[in-house]
Image (cartoon, rainbow, N blue to C red):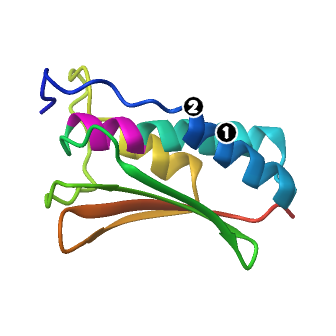
Amino acid sequence: MCDPNLNSPSLTVSREALRDTMARAGYPNSSIGDAELALVELVVNAWRHGLTAAPVVLVAVVRGTLRVTVADRSPVLPEQRKPDPFAQSGRGLMLVEGLMHRWGAEPQKLGKRVWFELDGAA
């Protein structure tokens, strides 16, 4: 859970980099908005559950596919699960799954990387 001593993450630079990269690659505004929402989910999860005040964010378009990666210090990999319909949280990764083409998580030497991909604009 979230450490109350950690400050909330600043998303401004990551969101600007994402929007700029996607606009230059020709993605429509609707896709940019969807990817921005997915990025915010991953960064907030890294902050809240990964106890990482400044998660590392990588944004790239490779061979026509956007890939966004967020790294944190927690070794716990997220699971695909059905949320409790009465829970007040736990739907973020379902949102990412619904908006993006693919997502996943990979362990690192220290922590993990959670990523999503969006295929290029047709």
| Amino acid type, callout 1 | Glu
Residue 51: quarter of image: top left
Q: Which residues are magenta?
A: 42-48
The spot of residue 39 in percent (x, y) is: 51, 43
**Which is nearer the eye, 50 or 27?**
50
Q: Which residue is mark 1?
A: 16
Residue beneath the point at 57% across and 31% down: 12
Contact (Cβ within 8 Å) of mark 2 with mark 1: yes
Instruction: Give the structural element (helix, strand or loop) at label 2.
Output: helix
Location of the N terminus (image quadrant):
top left
User: On the rendered structure, is 76 left or right of 56?
Assistant: left
Q: How many marks?
A: 2
From what the image shows, is residue 101 above or below residue 88?
Answer: below
From what the image shows, is residue 77 above or below residue 65?
Answer: above
Residue 37: quarter of image: top right
**Which is nearer the eye, 81 or 115?**
115
Q: Residues within 10 Å of mark 2 (few under 14, many from 20)?
A: few
**Which is nearer the eye, 99 or 16?**
16
From what the image shows, is residue 108 above or below residue 20?
Answer: below
The spot of residue 85 in percent (x, y) is: 26, 27
The spot of residue 93 in percent (x, y) is: 37, 45
Residue beneath the point at 16% across and 29% down: 2
- Is residue 1 inside the magenta stretch? no
Q: CA distance from mark 2 to mark 1?
A: 6 Å
Residue beneath the point at 76% across and 53% down: 22
Q: Which residue is mark 2?
A: 12
User: On the rendered structure, is 67 left or right of 94?
Assistant: right
Instruction: Give the structural element (helix, strand or loop) at label 1.
Output: helix
| Amino acid type, callout 2 | Thr
Residue 44 is tagged as none
Look at the magenta stretch and give its main secondary structure: helix
